[in-house]
Amino acid sequence: MTVAVPARQRPLMPALLLALLTMVLASLPEWELLPTPQGGVTLTEARLTGPDGNDETVRLPHSLHVPWAGPARAVYELTFTLDQPISGAQELYVPAARHSLSFSVNSRPGPEPAESPWLQPAQGMTTLVRLPHHLFVAGENRLRIELARREGSIPFHLSAVHLGPAGSLAQTPWFSMLLAGQGRIAAFVLHAVVLVGLLTLWTARRHDPVFRWLALLGSTTLAAALPEVGLVPAAAPVGPLVPLPTLLMGAFGLMALGLALAIAELPRPRWLVVATGAVPLVLLGWVLLQPERPLLPALVGAAIALLGHLAGALALILGFFRKRRWDMGLLAMPFLLVAWIGLRDVLVVTGLREAPFLLSSYVRPLTMLALVVLLMRRLASSLDSLDAANDVLRRRLAEQESELSSLHARERERAAQAVREEERQRLTRDLHDGLSGHLISIIALSERGSGEAAAVERAARAALDDLRLVINSLDIGDGDLPLALAGFRERLEPQLRRLGIGLDWSMDKLPGIDGVSPGNALSVLRILQEAVTNAIKHGPARSIAITGGAGPEGMVRIEIGNDGSGGPPATGGHGLDNMRRRARELGGTIALERDEDGARLILLLPRHLGEV
Amino acid sequence: MQDGSEPLRIVLVEDDEPIRRRLAGIIAGWPRAELVAACGTLAEAVAAIAASPLDLLVTDLKLPDGNGIEAIRLLRRLRPAAEAMVISVLTDERSVLDAIEAGAAGYLLKDADQLDLVEAITDLMEGRSPISSRIARVLVRRLSERADAVAPRDAQPGLTPREMDILWGIAKGFTYGELAGHLGISRQTVPVHIRNIYRKLQASNRSEAVFEATRLGLIRL
């Protein structure tokens, strides 16, 4: 369906559809919708006694405009002749009459027509009454119909009157609804239900002008309808001259204009808000100051109402074509109808036009229906745009996530590269520190000649030892210091055995050390290697004891003892300096003790090793 | 097995000539041993193993025309009574372990001198095997990976708790002496347990191969 597609389409089809619908609804009152009875008599001539006391013969349907406001009555006397007495119940059918209808047949009062607050006799009503046959006589009969106006200045109206046997009128559901004023009940209930929805929306969206105007219009029109149906007492300060809703009409027109501007997304001028409140007060004051001429302010109010709806409809139609928003066109339709039907009713009230019914109060449900459709459509489109926004958000989120993860991957790659670089540098430095020194010695020794073969072998073995230390510490992780020490021991054992030196190794009591890395593990191993080398070189030791255990102040203590008597001086010496430096870098200390049993190098290390 | 009077017949496989000459010199200088062949390639090794009986294969793993493990496998098939020992460089625990699973019972570092070599060979022939803390660690890791994987029971080496204790202790860096003290056994029995571990590894490797072959549908049980 074309209208279901909201916006950004060629507006021709929806425009045509809406225009057609508007025209159909606008011309609806001109159709002959009331049923006509089969059989019986139709009375089209009456003797009218007007409120001013004049007598005249008129043809029905007839409208009587009285140039003053307030209570008045008009009496129509219809004469008809029956050839013979009739039997069976009869029905009196008055398709349309304005103002409260009562009647008598041959000076005997007939049954009162139905009374209901939902029936608004002043706006025209249909009457169908069953009459007992004994009211009628053979020969001339006189039917007297009296129309009584309670307030206002709406002209009297009486259509042709039908009289016939009961059941001659086909009773359709629509017709019964009309008879009981049920259309108004439906309109009122619909209005109340929509109002609840409008108020709910307004409380949830106070900042939205559309809902503000909707809530205002919905609640004031319903409030104005309350005295009309007698739900609240009509405490009209203006008395019977002008019904209160008539004075409020102007305000409704301005509210409709405000709503239309809000929906058309146009600015609402400040005076509009002020006038909405001021117009009914001004009109009320006018009526109170000049009670003898109440029709003029009522007409001004009606004119404002018509112009407000018309201007609102125009704003909506412009918005519909400019913004291609069918919802604007949809609301323009009831606004136009209100203006059109209102104009028609004004003409009827002022006596410029004759019509059986005033229809303004039937247009209200149409407006409400349009509002319901519009609001549902708005809800649906907001949900759609919410979904779309969610999709966009999700997509953006996914994009950002992937961007972030690729960024993260790059960052990780960089970090890994930095780690590798650092590792490479460390390895280079470690190899250079130990290995290259030994290799340079080997070169120097080899250059001196073949007499240095033993020294070359020693230097080569030292180089190999150091290489082993580096390699041995390469894959050392946290908590792996015992493993590094074991690798060192496994290498040391055969070397010492070859030299005839005993090794007493005990790392059983070594406390746990964390923060162990290849770098600091290598430093520990190099200190041990240096100490062992010193013990072998300077001892000369016959046995070496390497013992791990707990030291003072929570430190870890590794002691390298030998039973040699000699050794380097307690201070100084290249090897010892190296050991001290390494121990300091690890956050530990080196101490050399010597007595008659031998020498002991004591290495104290913190429980947590720092990076070197 | 060697009865003590006969010299130990040894085939040496090492592609690096100076090292091969050095090791060959050490073996030749040891009165209890007899160097049957000193090979530089896998092909020579295969020929030597097939040519004459031997008691011990000492082989490098990386050879110009293949892997020493193939020589060990061939030895296991052709000379089941003979032992194998691999010459290892640093940081090749995994290859050494592969060789052990293929049937090697000991390993020797390349820079071993005469004392080391003689001691290693003696230990090996007397039923003792060495294991370094690093090899033990790799082995422990492998065993726990295998325990995690879905495998039939018989694919597990079926180590006894004592053997597992020894393996774990060595992986943690304990000396044989410390381990023996903890476990209340003699220091000398630790290498014997290790030899048993090697044998079970070899067996489990075989049954694992069978399992794998069954799975692939190569053989039907």
Image (cartoon, coloured by chain):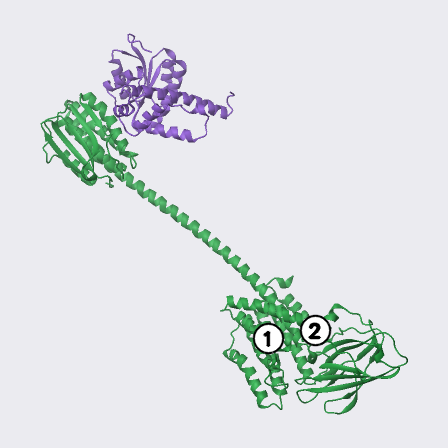
Chain colours: A green, B purple
Q: Earlier in the sequence, mark 1 or mark 2?
A: 2
On the question of residue A8 being in view, the answer is: no
Mark 1 element type = helix
Residue A474 in the figure: left or right of residue A70: left
Q: Which residue is mark 1?
A: A221
Up the image or down, A415 lies above or below A259; here it is: above
B33 or A184, which lies in front? Answer: A184
Q: In the image, what residue type sits under mark 1? A: Thr
- Name the residue furthest top: B5
Mark 2 element type = loop
Q: Nearer the viewer, mark 1 or mark 2?
A: 2
Q: Which residue is mark 2?
A: A181
Q: Quadrant of the C terminus of chain A?
A: top left
Could you tell me which residue is drawn at 24 percent across and 18 percent down? B114
Mark 1: give few (<14), some (14-19) or many (20+) Cα within 10 Å. Answer: some
Q: Position of residue B119 (x, y in %)?
A: 26, 17
Q: In the image, what residue type sits under mark 2? A: Gly
Q: Position of residue A503 (x, y in %)?
A: 20, 24
Mark 2: give few (<14), some (14-19) or many (20+) Cα within 10 Å. Answer: many
Occupied quadrant, residue A186: bottom right
On the question of residue A37 being in view, the answer is: yes
Q: How many marks?
A: 2
Q: Position of residue A273 (x, y in %)?
A: 52, 78
A578 or A424, which lies in front? Answer: A578
Could you tell me which residue is drawn at 28 percent across and 31 percent down? A483
Up the image or down, A511 lies above or below B188; here it is: below
Q: CA distance from mark 1 to mark 2?
A: 19 Å
User: Badge 1 sits on which subunit?
Assistant: A
Residue A228 in the figure: left or right of residue A173: left
Q: Quadrant of the N terminus of chain A?
A: bottom right
